[in-house]
Amino acid sequence: MKIAVFGTGPAGRTVAAALASQLHSVSIGTRDPAATLARDDRGPDGDRQTFAQWHAHNAEIRLLTFEEAARDAWLVFNLTAGEAVLAALQAAGKPNLADKVLIDVSNALDFSAGFPPSLSISNTDSLAEVIQREFPETKVVKSLNTVNAALMVNPKALAGGDHTIFLSGDDAGAKEIASDLLRAFGWEDIIDLGELSNARGMEMYLPLWVRLMGTLGTANFNIKVVR
Amino acid sequence: MKIAVFGTGPAGRTVAAALASQLHSVSIGTRDPAATLARDDRGPDGDRQTFAQWHAHNAEIRLLTFEEAARDAWLVFNLTAGEAVLAALQAAGKPNLADKVLIDVSNALDFSAGFPPSLSISNTDSLAEVIQREFPETKVVKSLNTVNAALMVNPKALAGGDHTIFLSGDDAGAKEIASDLLRAFGWEDIIDLGELSNARGMEMYLPLWVRLMGTLGTANFNIKVVR
């Protein structure tokens, strides 16, 4: 499948590389490819690569503008940061996203007032619903926003995969395509919560996730719905 | 221990009966005991009892006003509905709650606009923090708000108890007392999230819980934090 991944950070790189390893035709979309290649965004831990270093080892993944990537793709993974989502999608352009599946993995976390973070959209609305209203011809599916990047594409690395991932969306066919991609990553316990308004609950879980990360001292955890 | 349970609904009755079975001295607080005994609040399923019928089988649990119950107790469980919490605690009276542990189990769910519910307090605040600000001399601990009444007091009834309960609060001693009560109910995986502001995450999980209940067709579920 021709897939565009929006987002050049750790999550975008991880998902793009995993999809490419499954022989999908993958591009990464960004605002300005030259600026992305010139950026030194290595993390404090020392082992994170610049985008250019990462891309040199993943040359089969094309680096394109949001517009080029969306035009070429059949499906888009949105892994941009919450505050950058709408600008990225607007740069992609409505016609280039129409009738396509958009898997929205973003979270509208707002750390501006410190810890615990708040959400810039929540409760009676969700980031996924905002996207759906802005792009009514796009088939938005919310998923994967409740785990870190490594677990998104390799759930079996934790407890053999015995934990849960959620999805929600208004288009049944789009959710089936998303479910197939989740299964290809190794997800077995996939709970379809129903229509896209249930993205509210999925996004409102994040403040608990962030605090659990602090308490547990790792992002390598997830929840299992025991029933 | 002398414990007051606020709330005469299914959750209050379940917790009060469980505490009484552990030989605590338990009272149930309500606004107007005579009105509570006269109320016919049986549910549509037919097997739920009126409060008076339930109380006839649990006569060792005293039915008192909020004020009487708080004055007599060393610890209070708040199981009133979200919109009734502050009125109940104000009726109990600040002096009667001072220096006491208050385990707040309530959720500020607002179903007025239908499904999924929103929260009347969330994101940059929580019901538990509102209570703590209103009653600064009371030691508020948030816990048990993420499971249904039956699981609160009998977690081993689901998957042998292999799932997680959270707590948060600003007073370490109060959290230790709350943890002892949780262990007595059978909880083994108890995660202390830290200060009371983390009640935000615990309360913001509820919209996901409510939708999971609908999707799974049961309230007899919980999450396990897999790490």
Image (cartoon, coloured by chain):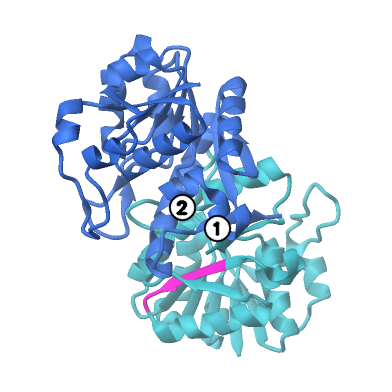
Chain colours: A cyan, B blue
Q: Position of residue A26 (x, y in %)?
A: 66, 83
Identify the residue at horizontal 55%, vertical 40% (top origin).
Answer: B185
Q: Chain of mark 1?
A: B
B88 or A171: which is nearer to us?
A: B88
Q: Residues within 10 Å of mark 2 (few under 14, many from 20)?
A: many
Q: Which mark is residue B13?
A: none
Q: Tell me the element at label 1.
A: loop
**In the picture shown, does residue B27 fall above or below B215?**
above
Q: Position of residue B67 (x, y in %)?
A: 29, 16
Q: Which mark is residue A204?
A: 2
Q: Which mark is residue B158?
A: 1
Disc 1 and disc 2 in contact, CB within 8 angstroms: no
Relative to B133, is A41 on the left or the right? right
Q: Tell me the element at label 2.
A: helix
Q: Residues within 10 Å of mark 1 (few under 14, many from 20)?
A: some
Q: Position of residue A45 (x, y in %)?
A: 82, 49
Magenta residues (range) = A165-170
Q: Is residue A172 visible?
A: yes
Disc 1 to disc 2, how far (Cα)? 25 Å
Identify the residue at horizontal 41%, vertical 64% (top origin).
Answer: B218
Q: Quadrant of residue B13?
A: top left
Identify the residue at horizontal 78%, vertical 54% (top origin).
Answer: A42
B46 or A226: which is nearer to us?
A: B46
Queried whether the magenta region covers residue A168, the answer comes back as: yes
- Which amino acid type is shown beneath numbered disc 1? Leu
**Residues tagged by mark 1 and mark 2 found on one chain of the structure:** no
Queried whether the magenta region covers residue B139, the answer comes back as: no
Identify the residue at horizontal 57%, vertical 30% (top origin).
Answer: B195
**In the picture shown, does residue B202 fall above or below A80?**
above
Give the main secondary structure of the magenta stretch.
Answer: strand
Point out the image quarter for the N terminus of chain A.
Answer: bottom right
- Which amino acid type is shown beneath numbered disc 2? Met
